[in-house]
Structure formats: C-alpha cells, structure tokens
Amino acid sequence: MNNWEQYVRKVTPYVPGEQPNSTNMIKLNTNENPYPPSPKVLEALSGFEADRLRLYPDPTASELVQALADYHGVNPENVFVGVGSDDVLAMSFLTFFNSDKPILFPDITYSFYDVWAELFRIPYQRPELNADFSMQLSDYYQENGGIVFPNPNAPTGLLESISAIEDILAHNKEVIVIVDEAYIDFGGATALPLLQQYENLMVVRTFSKSRSLAGMRIGYAIGNAKLIQYLNDAKYSFNSYTMNQTSLALGMASVLDQEYFEKTCAQIIETREWTKQELASLGFTFPDSKANFIFASHPDNPARDLFAALRKEHIYVRYFDKPRIDNYLRITIGTKEEMQILIDFFKDYMK
Ligand SMILES: *Cc1c(COP(=O)(O)O)cnc(C)c1O
C-alpha cells in the first residue's frame, strides 16, 4: 500500500441494480414504475425555459416544500427535500446517528443502510428478522443510537402494522427513529399520524417509485420542525443547492396531479395481486407484498438459476447473493403485459 493510502476513507460501496442499455428488455430489477410520469410533469418539462439554468436554484426549494406540506397537511417547517431519498437518508444518518451506541436496522433490509453506517463510521447492529421476515419488536427495546427501517420492508415487501411501529417508538423516545416509506403508496398505512405524538419520528419518502420519477432524483423527509432544522443545518454545511431547477419544477407538477398518481398506483396494485396469484399457482412462495415488487422463492427451482435463465431472455429481475435470501428473486411489478411475459416464461421453464 502507498503511504497516502492509509489515510483514505475506504468504503465498500452500495451496488445498484443493473441499468442495461437495451430497448428490447423487460426491466423488473430496480423497482421503477412502468408508467410514464404524470402528463403535467411532461408539460412542465416542455415548458421549462433553458435560460433559467444560468441561475442557481432556490436553495430552500420553497415551492416544492410548500406543495409537499400542503399535500400532507403539515407546515413547510416539517419538510426537508433532497436528491432522491438516498440523499435524504444519507444526510439523516450523518445528522442524527452520532452516538457511541449502535444504530439498529434489520439483517434483511435496504442494503444502503450498512454502507452509510460504514461511510460515516456509525456503529450498527442488525437484529435478525423472524423466519417469516417480520420484525422481532423486542430486538428494538435494547439501548441504541437510533433506528431505521423501511416500511414496507425492502426487499421482502412485508408491511409492519402501525401498532408495531408505535411499539418501537414507545420504547425508543431517546433516539431518532426513521421510517423509510419508499413503497408506502402501494397500499400500506403510513406512520405520518404518529408524528403528532412522537417528535423523534422521521418519515422518508421518494418520487422514484410511485411517482415514476426515479430519473429526476427527488426525495423528502417529514418530521417535527426542530428535527428538520437540524437536517437543513447539515445540508447547508455540505451543499446548499442539492435540488436542481428541473427537479423542483417537475416535482411540483407531480405533486399537484393527485388523480394520475392514484390511478397509476391502483394499476400497479391490481397487477401485483394478479401476479401473486399466478406465481402462487406455479408453486412460488412469497411474503404478502404491499410494495411494487414481489420477493419470491420456488421449492424446486433455485433462484440463481431462474435469474440467469430470465436474463438470457432479456428479462431482468434482482437477485441478492446474501445469507437467508439467496434463494429469492425480487421481481418488480411492471405492466400487466410485462408480467404476463414473465409468467409465460416461468410456465415454459417449469414444464
Ligand atoms: C428505492 C429506495 C430508496 C431510494 O430511493 P431514491 O429516492 O431513488 O434515492 C430508499 N429506500 C428504499 C427502501 C428504497 O427501496
């Protein structure tokens, strides 16, 4: 090793799902939305004046923050926006997880959490999920430096009840509890009402899945004003202009089109339920997903083989070569037509 290398902040990075550059593929590997963004977003995009790009964006993102505050019935002081929820979560880890005690998140969960913990040198523990992938609530009663988990969980799709979340909050009033609601719009009950009672709760959302805007990079957090202020302090100490002009304009347009949002979410839920039935009749087992993906396993066909066979046909799903989940495929819900092709492939493969 060179001398200077000993001072490098070394990290093992997060590995995102493949983004193959191909047109004739079925892409069910990164939980993107199969439908285009709202027509209002497309209008805002074509009406966007390129000359505005000369100017710095509004560092407070006030219009988008106001639109989100109105949407959720909170005050602008309760909303923080960032470059995708990954940015919001990373900033939150940096800001709130500053204890010598370990933060807690499940052993099977969004695989960015341990990467941020490593990057920021935050000690962490990963309590094991139960065999059915539910959270063992008593694991979260121990002393800790903060808690974070997605609800529904990724990559399992399993939703925890509001009473389960409240139980975790009731046992952890001394630390920040982050609920990552990346997939909540696909039929889950949000933890947002608990903000009334728990000032240490922060809820994180994204435009990437339910709003079809993964390419735009927009995420946000909702929490009490003091907590949001701390987040903003960290942000302004890092990069004041996280949100670019186009993200602000297009994000606004998306929030204002409630009808389209509800319609596309309902379509995905319907296709998910259809896909569950088809997979079950092929012998797959899976937790009852409330997300836009299904985490499926087959008793006779190893997930690794299925993954490779699908890939040959340009059907991309996600496979994690990790303990406890290496016989599962995470399959994003695409259009009904895409799911039909997937099911037809399985039928043919298992003949
Ligand atoms: C997709 C995802 C994110 C990140 O979403 P972006 O807003 O695109 O950065 C965060 N958390 C979970 C659990 C996710 O699945």
Image (cartoon, rainbow, N blue to C red):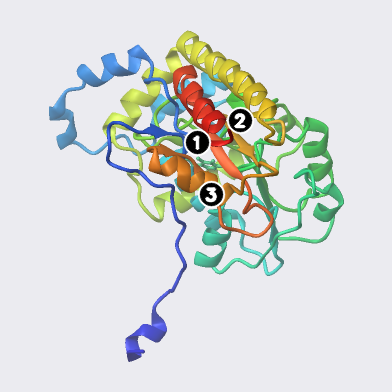
Nearest-to-viewer mark from 1 and 3: 3
Identify the mark nearer the N-term, 1 or 3: 1
Residue that mark 1 sits on? 220
How many angstroms separate mark 1 from mark 2 (CA)? 19 Å
Mark 3 vs mark 2: which is more N-terminal? 2
Kindly state the secondary structure of the residue where label 3 is placed: helix
Q: Nearer the viewer, mark 3 or mark 2?
A: 3
Asked if residue 315 lies left or right of residue 247, the reply is right
Tag 1–tag 3 contact (CB < 8 Å): no
- Residue behind mark 2: 291
Q: Amino acid at mark 2?
A: Ala
Q: Which residue is mark 3?
A: 305
**Front position in the image: 149 or 335:** 335
Calculate the distance from the C-alpha at mark 1 to the C-alpha at mark 3: 38 Å
Amino acid type, label 1: Tyr
Q: Nearer the viewer, residue 291 or 256?
A: 291
Q: Residues within 10 Å of mark 2 (few under 14, many from 20)?
A: many
301 lies left or right of 215 = right
State yes or no: discs 1 and 2 in contact (Cβ < 8 Å): no
Quadrant location, the N terminus: bottom left
Q: Residues within 10 Å of mark 1 (few under 14, many from 20)?
A: many
Q: Please, what secondary structure does the residue beneath circle 2 have?
A: loop
